[in-house]
Image (tube, grey):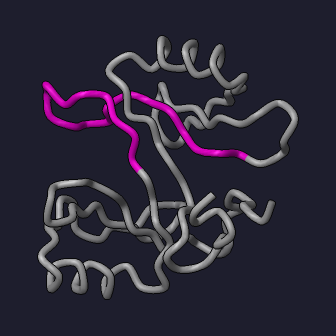
Amino acid sequence: MIGASVVNEPGSLVWEDLRSTDPDTARSFYGALFGYEYEALEMAGPDYTTFQLPTEPHVLGGMGGLMGLPDGTPSHWLVYFATADVDAAVSAAQGAGGTVLAPAFDTPYGRMACLADPDGATFMVMTPDPSQPGPDRSG
């Protein structure tokens, strides 16, 4: 798969979120489709869970509600790309015609920002906190 051989380094996918208008229904759907198992991650929000395959020890991503997004926002997947420097990535995105949707901010998981490409596709850039365990995408 394209991109699957690049893991845990700048430019690689480091996380994916499903932001849903109905997270319980989404969990039922993806659980039935892929066999995902879920675990609550309370520090991320009351209806937020991580998901993983029962045969794998590694968390694949998270699922939760819209988490403060404006009314009318549809359910969507949001990918997170690793970067060595979030602030530099924000500047580079703006210089290349992108839009900053949420300026760089710090979380317990690392520094991140929400961006959109020139066509409006949204994504996150993130410098993971090295003291926090992250998903092991090494295979």
Q: Position of residue 133 (x, y in %)?
A: 71, 62
Across the whole image, how many numbered discs are drawn on residues? 0
Q: Residue at x 26, y 78 (%)?
A: 90
Magenta span includes 110: no
Q: Position of residue 58 (x, y in %)?
A: 77, 48
Comparing 15 with 139, the one in front is 139
Q: Position of residue 22 (x, y in %)?
A: 38, 16
* 26 w.r.t. 80: above or below: above
Q: Residue at x 63, y 19 (%)?
A: 33
| Left or right of 77 on screen, residue 72 | left
Quarter residue 132 falls in: bottom right
Comparing 39 with 43, the one in front is 39
Which stretch appears magenta?
59-78
| Left or right of 23 on screen, residue 14 | right
Q: Which quadrant does the N terminus fall into?
A: bottom right
* 54 w.r.t. 117: above or below: above
Farthest front residue?
A: 1
| Left or right of 48 on screen, residue 112 | left
Q: Which quadrant does the C terminus fall into?
A: bottom right
Q: Residue at x 69, y 57 (%)?
A: 135
* 11 w.r.t. 3: above or below: below
Quarter residue 31 falls in: top right
Magenta span includes 74: yes
Q: Main secondary structure of the magenta part?
A: loop
Farthest right residue?
A: 55
Q: Position of residue 95 (x, y in %)?
A: 15, 86
* 24 w.r.t. 66: above or below: above
Q: Residue at x 47, y 11 (%)?
A: 25
Comparing 66 with 15, the one in front is 15
